Amino acid sequence: MQVLCGVLMHIAMVSGEYPPRWGGIGSVVYHLAGHLAQRGHDVTIITRTHKQRTPQQPGVSVLHVPWLKAPMAFTRSYGKHALTELRRLHKVKEVDVVHTLLPLVSWTAKEYLWVEENIAPVVSALNGSWIGEREGMKLAAQHKESATWKNPNDLAILLTGGHYSKYEQAGIEHSSVSVAISESTRKEFEAWYNPPENWHCETVLYGVDHNVFRPMNHDHEEEQLAYEALRKSYDAADEAALHGSPDTKTPLLLAVGRLVARKGHRTLLRSMPRILEHHPGARLVIVGRGHMRATLLRQAKRLGVAHAVHIMPGMSFDALALHFRSADLVIYPSYYEGQGLIPLEALASGTPVVTVNQPPLTEMIDEEVGGLFACGDPDDLARAVVRCLDRPEERTEQMQKGRQRVLERFTYEHNAEAYENIYLSLIDE
C-alpha cells in the first residue's frame, strides 16, 4: 500500500448500491473506495444486503444491512439500518468522515444532525435528484418513449419523488459539505431545493476505470480474435472493420443503458431508418436490462430496421469493455442524467460519442470527441451519427482526443485526490 496522505482517515461510505448487483453509483463507490485505500485510508462501505458475492479490495471493508424491497421506500428503510450500523461501527473503530451517496440514502434532518454531532462530519454526494428523475421521465413521455405506469420504479418516482426529495433537502441543509457530480446537478439543486445561503457545495465529476475501459489492441492475438468474433456476431465485419479501419462500410453503433423511458432508446430507433439510408451496413447494439425490451424489438420491426438492431442483456465489465472498444460510435440519447458515465467509458475505450446537446453531457462531450444533437429529435440524432460516420479521418482524431481527455480529467485517481482534499478540509476545521 502506497501512503500518499500525511493524515490517514477512517472513511465510512453509506451507499445503497455496491457491486455486483447494482451499477452506476455502486461502480463509482467500488473504484473510489479502492483508490482511497491505495492512498492509505481505511474505508468501510455500508450497503444493502444481497445474495451475490461481494468483490474484495485491500483496505476496504463492506458491511451489509437489510432493507425493504419496495420502490422508493427502500431508501428510507436502508437509511435507518445503515445509521444503526454506522453507530455500531463508530464504537468499534472511530469514523473520521461519513460519505453518503444521495439520493439512495434517506435520512431526516434530525438524523444528519445526530451524525454530525456524535460521529463525524458528513459529505453528501449529489448523484442527481428525485425531482430531476421525475422531470426527465415527463420529458421522455412527451417524446413518446414509454408509459410510466409500465415500470413500478418509474411510477413510484413519478408519484412520490416530491415526497422523497425532502430527504435530499435534509442532506444539503445538514451535511458539512455537498458534492455535486456535475455543474448541471449543482444548478439543479440550487433551482429546485433552495439551499441555505451558507451552503457549501463542491463539484467533482466522476471518472472511469481507464485500465478496464481502454482502446483496442489489434496486435494482441487473443484480443483481436475476440474483437473479430464480436463484430461477426453482429454482422458488422467487412475487411476494413476487421482490421480496425474507421472507413468501414459496416459500422457498429453501440448504446448502453437501462431499458427505461428516460434513456431515450425509442428516439434512437426512430433515427435508424435515416442512418441506414446513408450507411446500409450499419448495425446497432443496445446493451441493458429493463422492462422495455419487447417494446423496442416490436418498434424496430415496425420501422423495418429489425435486421440491423440487436438488444443484449446486461453483461460483465470485461464483456462490456470489449463492446466499447469494438464499436465505431457510442450513442447516448438520455433525457436526464446526474452526470452519465457511459460517454466517459466510451471515450476511455477510444470510441467517439454522439449524445444530447444539453448539460451535464456537454460538460464531457463536444465535437472534438464526438457529436451533439437536439434532445428527443431523431432526425437530428441521425444527422449527428451520419456526420461522424462520413468523416473517418476526423473520427480517428476524436478517438485519440477522447482517450486523452479522460486521462487528463476523468479518472478515479482524480476523484480520490479531490475527495481526500474535501475530507481533510473538514478535519482541519
Image (spheres, grey):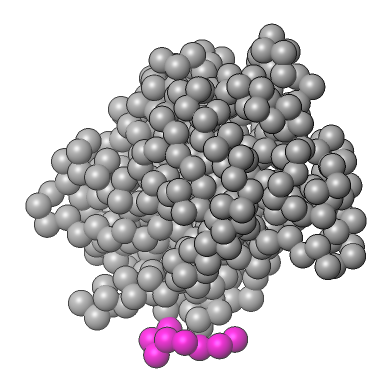
User: Furthest-top residue in view?
Assistant: 302
Q: Position of residue 189 (x, y in %)?
A: 25, 43
Q: Do we see residue 330 in this rendering?
A: no
Quadrant where the image shows the N terminus: bottom right
The image position of residue 203, as x and y in percent, is 31, 58
Return the residue found at the far left.
197
User: Residue shown at 20%/77% (left/top)?
Assistant: 429
User: Magenta part mainly helix, strand or loop?
Assistant: loop
Q: Quadrant of residue 64?
A: bottom right
User: Compared to 58, does 299 lie above or below?
Assistant: above
- Say left or right for 210 vs 361: right
Is residue 422 placed above or below 384 in the rendered structure? Answer: below
Instruction: Please give the range of residues in magenta.
Output: 1-8
Q: Is residue 166 above or below residue 91?
A: above
- Residue sitting at x 39%, y 90%: 6
Q: Residue at x 51, y 83 (%)?
A: 40
Figure disc tally = 0
Judging depth in this view, the residue of 49 and 161 nearest the camera is 161
- Asked if the stretch drawn in magenta spans residue 237, the answer is no
Residue occupying the point 47% across, 27% down: 380
Left or right of 120 in this view: 33? right
Q: Nearer the viewer, residue 292 or 381?
A: 381
Residue 338 horizontal/vertical position (percent) = 40, 44
Residue 378 seen in render:
yes
Residue 332 x %, y %: 54, 38
Q: Name the residue nearer the viewer: 189 or 371.
A: 371
Looking at the image, residue 54 sits to the left or right of residue 412; the answer is: right
